Amino acid sequence: MKKVIKDTFFEGERPLFATNDIRLENVKFYPGESALKECKNVEAYNCEFMCKYPFWHNENALIENSLFTVYGRAAIWYSKNLRMINTRVDAPKMFREIDGLYLENVKFSTAAETLWNSRDMKLRNVQVRGGDYIFMNGINIDIEDFYLQGNYSFQDAKNVVIRNAKLDSKDAFWKTENVTVYDSELNGEYLGWHSKNLKLVNCKISGTQPLCYCTNLVMENCTFAEDCDLAFEYSTLEAVVNSNIVSIKNPTDGFILCDSVGEVIIDENCKNPEGCKIRLNKETCFAS
């Protein structure tokens, strides 16, 4: 049975260091460091964190209906099996080196450099703003109902599934492996460069020079906006795009099926001029 600590506050260095099996209710953590470091089986309800590094080296933590203020930066690192529900995070650098993370109804207002080097993550109804470099080096990520504003997202991430998302993110999915995105809107230039096994299904895409240097790119029932020019340079792909493509440049291998294409550029720098077949609505080859 957990010890209950409620309606109080803590401050300073390590006030609850290595304390296990506790339930915090309506507790405030004022400036200080490492309030709950090296703890196990902590539950926190209606708590407010204004201290640095409160949940480092934790196991089996549950945080609900709480607030991490801008002063609670780098709050949760090197931890295992953490659940966060109905919580607001105003601090950057949240979550690093986490194994086993569940987020539900969580809002991040300033999420720069968040969720780095973490594994086995599930997110449901999460909103992120200011999330530059979020999910860097992440592995095994399952996301549904997600909004992101932040550039360079998912860099070097592996084994990712995303459903029903809107990403306003320049340079998203760079050098990723085994990423699948369903029913989503992807806004931002240089999408997916250097990725391997990127699959996009029922997605709306905008931004210049999308999906270049991709290996084994698959697109099903996607659409391109009018600013998606110079697409697919040096990519190997199987793409079905149900819209016009402004311009395609030097694809390497595979096929592209689209409604129409404004310009196909096959120049002296093309590595395999005959490799990629471009067709219009299953008609005869348009260009190669």
Image (cartoon, rainbow, N blue to C red):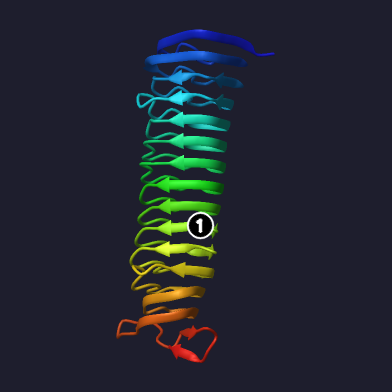
Quick one: 41 or 128, which is closer to the camera?
128
Q: Secondary structure at mark 1?
A: loop
Q: In this view of the protein, can residue 157 be seen by the observer?
A: no
- Does residue 124 lie above or below 180 as drawn? above
What x and y, as percent, mark residue 250?
37, 79
**Where in the figure is residue 273, as x and y percent of width and height?**
40, 86
Relative placement, left or right, of 248 versus 7 is: left
Query: Quick one: which residue is furthest to the right in this view?
Result: 1
Residue at 56% over, 31% down: 85
Q: Is residue 53 visible?
A: yes
Q: Is residue 17 above or below residue 238?
A: above
**Screen quadrant of the C terminus:** bottom left
**Residue with the most extreme top position:** 8
Which residue type does callout 1 highlight? Ser
Residue in the picture at 45% in, 17% down: 35
Instruction: Say whether residue 123 is left or right of residue 132.
Output: right
Please tell me which residue is depicted at 60% across the width and 15% down the height of the picture: 22
Q: Residue 151 location in percent, x, y?
A: 35, 50
> Badge 1 local density, few (<14 within 10 Å), some, or many (20+)?
many
Quadrant of the image containing the N terminus:
top right
Q: Which residue is mark 1?
A: 184
